[in-house]
Amino acid sequence: MSERTTAAIILAAGTSSRIGEDRHKLLLPLGDRPVIAHVLDAVLASQAQPVLLVLGHRSAQLRAVLAPYLAHLEVHPVYNPLYQQGMSTSIHAGITELTHLVPDCDSALIILGDQPLLSAAILDTLMEARHTTHSRIVAPLYQGQRGNPVLFERNLFPELQEVQGDEGGRAVLTRHRTEITSIELGSTHANYDVDTWDAYEAVVKEWHKQHPSDE
C-alpha cells in the first residue's frame, strides 16, 4: 500500500443520547437507506482506504443493516467496548486497528457517522490538499467555520490516542493550530449532522432539495 494512503476512520459507536426516544440516529431513514449508509457511500466512492467503521452502541443491529457494506474488502468493522466513555475512545480504537492493518499509513480522516450529506469530492479534496501541502492537519471550512471531517498525519496518531472524553481531536487541533491547512468548501450543508431531532429534520429537508426526483 502506498505511503500516500489516507485511511478513513468512521465514528459510529455513540449512544445517540441527544436525539431521544431510544432512537439510533445512524439508523434513521434518509431517502432509501439509513444515515450511516450515506456516509459509507461517500467514503467508498472516495480515494480513502482502508475504511475502519468503529461500532459500539447497538453494534449487532448496525452490522446486520450494513452487511452489504461490510462485505467490501476495504471496510473493517472495529468494536469499541468503551464507547460510553465518549468519542475519544472510538478514535483510540480506530487508530489502534489502523496501525495494525497499515503500519505505514500516511494519514487518516476522522469522519463522523452522522454526517450524511458528506461527499466523496470533499474527502478527496482534503486528501489532495494533504498530498500537495504536506500539512500535518487538513480541515474543511464551511463558509468560514471549521467543520468535519479532519485529516491528521500519521505522526499525530500518538496524540490522538491520548485525547479524552467526548471532544474528539479538538485538543490536538488546538495544540497544532499553526500547522493546519484549512480548505474552504462553501456550502454548510455537508457539515450538517443528526445529533438532535431538529438537526435530523434539517438534514432530511436538505437531502430532498438535493434529490427532488426521489420524492
Image (spheres, grey):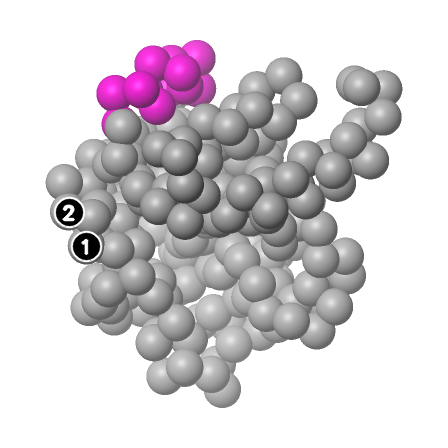
State the extent of the magenta-drawn residues as a range: 59-70
Report the amino acid beneath label 1.
Answer: Gln
Q: Is residue 169 magenta?
A: no
- Which quadrant of the rendered structure holds the C terminus? top right
On the image, numbered disc 2 is attached to which residue?
82
Secondary element at image label 2: loop
Q: Nearer the viewer, residue 198 or 134?
A: 198
Q: Residue at x 56, y 54 (%)?
A: 127
Q: Nearer the viewer, residue 61 or 42?
A: 61
Residue 74's disc is none
Give percent across and percent down for residue 164: 22, 67
**What secondary structure is the magenta-colored segment mainly?**
helix
Q: Is residue 60 magenta?
A: yes
Q: Residue at x 75, y 40 (%)?
A: 206
Q: Residue at x 21, y 46 (%)?
A: 83
Q: Residue at x 58, y 74 (%)?
A: 181
Give the tally of numbered discs: 2
Q: Residues within 10 Å of mark 1 (few under 14, many from 20)?
A: few
Check the image and report above or below for 73 versus 174: above
- Which quadrant of the rendered structure holds the N terminus? top left
On the image, numbered disc 1 is attached to which residue?
85
